Image: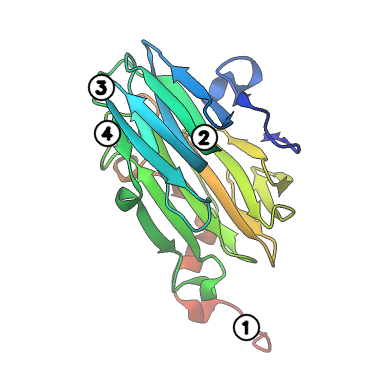
Amino acid sequence: MKISHKPPFNRGLTLLSPRSGKTADMLMDFGVLVLSSGDVYKSESDADERVFLLSRGSAVISWGSRSAEISRPGLFDHLPWCLSAPGGCAVEIKAGKAGAEFFLAATDNPRGFEPRLFGPEECRNELRGKGTMRETSTRIVRTIFDDSDRSESNLVIGEVIGIPGTWSSYPPHHHPQPEIYHYRFLPPRGFALTAIGDTPYIIHDRDTILIREGEVHPQVTAPGYAMWYLWIIRHLEGARYGPATSTPIFVEDHKWVMGNEDNIWKPGEE
């Protein structure tokens, strides 16, 4: 399912995927928070864990008795700041002089755990796909947290930079856990193509894709443009995402592309 949003996001919180109606099966809220200079946003919940990922700008973010000044000039060349807060933890964000934009997600979680601010130095930054498929699926994958360092959470969160003309979410794969993608492009008029199950979509700046159980979701960035996207996965009860549950599940017909490159066709070899 594709959710388009062509104009800039309005000041305040724009909820793109609520836990109600036709998006209830995603099991998480997702939205974009835009703050002007000096704006203050407060978040409290007894039952929900929440994540606040800084997209651009600067802010003072406070949780419990702690606070930190954070800034991020942009998505593509700068690593993220992300606050993970449990239910019962009050969060306050005050935007800096240039304002700020955050991505927010929330889901139910009865566990009690300590809030944690993940900084750029903690982000796992890797060139995934490097050395395979003649670099046609090499991309930058940034994992902010997963079960290896945030097993109390019901979420997994990260970012991907799609290099111009290359594939991502590849080889094609699926998993039972719901996942949200949110996109930005450089330059912003860029685009990408994706297939969610058997449904193709053209992806533009500020679009959001909802991926449901079992839906395969490969995508390719248009030549000349860089693609950034946020990915958020919601663990399921008894089926958490990650190696322990053998996820993601690669489509059997396409797993071979990760192997011997001599098997990949070259012009004149037919």
> Relative to 153, does residue 134 appear above or below in the rendering?
below
Task: Measure how far apart labels 4 and 1 are at the Cα level.
Answer: 44 Å
Mark 2 element type: strand
Tell me how far mark 1 sits from mark 3, CA to CA.
Answer: 60 Å
Task: From the viewer's side, name the closer residue of 171 and 106.
Answer: 106
Q: Disc 1, disc 3: CB below 8 Å? A: no
Residue receiving disc 2: 102
Say which amino acid is labelled 1.
Lys
What amino acid is labelled 4 in the image? Ser
Q: Position of residue 129 (x, y in %)?
A: 46, 65
Residue for badge 3: 65
Mark 1 vs mark 3, foreground winner is 3
Q: Judging from the image, what secondary structure is the residue with disc 3 in?
A: loop
Which residue in the structure is indicated by mark 4?
151
Label 1, on which residue?
266
* x then y, percent, for residue 104: 50, 29
Is 141 left or right of 46, judged from the image as shown? Answer: right
Task: Please identify the residue farthest to the top as the structure is shown.
Answer: 46
Q: Earlier in the sequence, mark 2 or mark 3?
A: 3
Under mark 3, the amino acid is: Ser
Q: Nearer the viewer, mark 3 or mark 4?
A: 3
Query: CA separation, marks 3 and 4?
Result: 23 Å
- Identify which residue is drawn at 39% across, 38% down: 82
Does residue 9 appear to the left or right of 113 in the view shown? right
Chain-order first, disc 4 or disc 1: 4
